[in-house]
Image (spheres, rainbow, N blue to C red):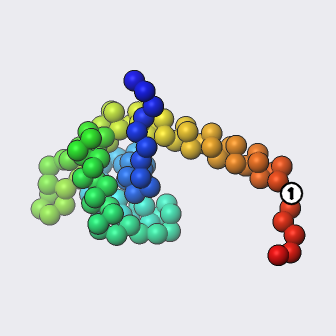
């Protein structure tokens, strides 16, 4: 299998939110807001959820009234693990470069 597909920011945040277990859309939005300080709009959130369901990275649970919980699939967990490892490596390199960068003077 080749490199995992790239994720948009909303999709990756949905996947990260679901690492704690199944959640419905409103709870996912609340968790993303806690993580980032920004609440995703319904179009961004449910567009990402729809794409993730369509690719088999998350699955829908049985609806409880109007709320439908979503959960990560094993494939989704594997792809999140790979994406987070890539992000960690990039962050580590960025920090190394920042330490080596000359200090900015007055503009």
87 over 28 or under it: above or below: above
Residue that protrudes farthest toward the bottom in the picture: 107
Image coordinates of residue 26 in percent, x first then y, are 29, 65
Please name the residue shown 44% across and 55% down the image.
Answer: 9
28 over 78 or under it: above or below: below
Q: Is residue 37 left or right of residue 78?
A: right
Residue that protrudes farthest toward the front in the picture: 107
Please name the residue shown 27% across and 49% down the image.
Answer: 51
Which corner quadrant of the image does residue 5 belong to? top left
Quadrant, the C terminus: bottom right
Q: Is residue 38 left or right of residue 48?
A: right
**Residue at the disc numbered 1:** 102
Q: Is residue 91 visible?
A: yes
Image coordinates of residue 75 in percent, x first then y, are 33, 33
Please name the residue shown 45% across and 31% down the image.
Answer: 3
Camera-side residue: 99 or 105?
105
């Amino acid at each position: 299998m080749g490199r995992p597909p790239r994720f948009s920011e909303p999709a990756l945040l949905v996947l990260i939110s679901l690492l704690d277990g199944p959640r419905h859309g409103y709870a996912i939005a609340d968790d993303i807001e806690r993580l980032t300080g920004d609440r995703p709009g319904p179009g961004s959130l449910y567009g990402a959820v729809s794409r993730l369901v369509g690719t088999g990275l998350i699955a829908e649970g049985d609806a409880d009234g109007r709320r439908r919980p979503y959960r990560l699939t094993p494939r989704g967990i594997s792809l999140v693990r790979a994406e987070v490892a890539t992000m960690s490596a990039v962050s580590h390199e960025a920090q190394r470069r920042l330490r080596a960068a000359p200090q900015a003077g007055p503009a």
